[in-house]
Image (cartoon, rainbow, N blue to C red):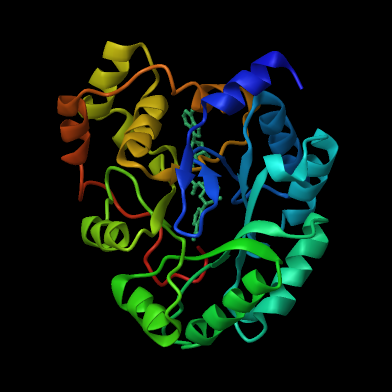
Amino acid sequence: MTVNAQKNANAIPGVQLSDGFVIPQLGIGTYQLPNDEAEAIVAAGLELGYRHIDTASLYKNEEGVGKAVAASGLDRSDVWVTTKLWHTDHGDPLGGLRASLDRLQLDYVDLFLIHWPTPKLGTAWQAWEGLIEARELGLTRSIGVSNFEIEHLERIIGDTGATPSVNQIELHPHHQHRELVEYCKQRNIVIESWSPLAQGRKQLFADPAVADAAKAHGKSPAQIVLRWHLEKGFVVFPKTATASRLGENLDIFDFELTAAEIEAIDALEGLGESSISPYDMNG
Ligand code: NAD
């Protein structure tokens, strides 16, 4: 490992989860990257100093992610790997996780999430009990959920008394889920922002709230938006298929937004479309 990679890795803050584990606040997203691209981008990211990868059985790239982690030569304990349970496996969460581990070539993941609540199916609530068991068996360190609304969280916490360590939701300046974020904050559920860059939407990057801050700090609009997430305490893993952007997305720890800049970005709530409707199965 190069001195620079270690320096970059050290610069990424950790966020304390309620279960005692500490998750790197910045990682790499891999949605829509096929195995070979995921392998290449994760390998390049680990070499730069990234230590957190977000994948899912749905993404069909766990093999590629696993190969890059193995080839990095890093200690397993130095890399955070998250994967997710798709709704077709709600009936057998342990089987779903074991299949993911097989593809990842890992003995355990750091975080295992229920990918969607799919309330119409009504199968996610029982699946939560399987995640609790997976944690007891050491197949995952932490457990959490994704795309859960308040009522879904109430349901699984009420049923089991076990609170998820994280809720991974679509979150960016156009779509801030303030009530849900406040609910999670009060229960020590860490928020992970998916589509943190609103999928690279020009409407967000060109908005004066973002563009003016970029100019003032000598940073790119993407770096300003990522910084906004960090200062809110959210965990992020922007996706890129372009290796040069990995360095850009990592170069966000040498400046801070002013209170006025944060307020201006906060005011973008409600502009633009959400990327995926809450119950869309494709997310
Ligand atoms: P994102 O907001 O990370 O946007 C990715 C796009 O932004 C890229 O395709 C690229 O076009 C652009 N981009 C990235 N870096 C840039 C830069 N420096 N400058 C300019 N443009 C840049 O969107 P995403 O991929 O949807 O979300 C990130 C990750 O969140 C996913 O890869 C996945 O791991 C996770 N995710 C989870 C769910 C879920 O249901 N849990 C849903 C979607 C995504």
Q: Quadrant of residue 258?
A: top left
At which x and y percent is residue 273? Answer: 30, 52
Residue positioned most to the front? 20
Please tell me whether residue 250 is drawn above or below residue 92 in the rendered image. above
In front: 132, or 214? 132
- In the rendered image of this protein, does residue 52 appear above or below residue 213? below
Q: Is residue 71 above or below residue 33?
A: above
Residue 48: which quarter of the image?
top right
Q: Residue at the spot x=41%, y=72% of the render?
A: 279
Q: Is residue 55 left or right of residue 163?
A: right
Going 15% across and 40% down the picture, which residue do you hit? 267
Question: Which residue is depicted at the point 37% across and 67% down?
Answer: 278
**Side of 30 where 165 appears, left or right:** left
Q: Nearer the viewer, residue 282 or 97?
A: 97
Location of residue 80 in the rendering, given as x and y in whole percent from the top left corner = 64, 46
Number of callouts? 0
Q: Position of residue 3 (x, y in %)?
A: 69, 15
Q: Is residue 83 left or right of residue 266?
A: right
| Res 253 → quadrant | top left
Relative to 100, is 245 on the left or the right?
Answer: left
Q: Quarter of the image containing the N terminus?
A: top right
Along the line of sight, the residue nearer the viewer: 91 or 141? 141
Residue 123 picture location, percent across and down:
52, 87
Identified at 32% across, 13% down, the residue is 217
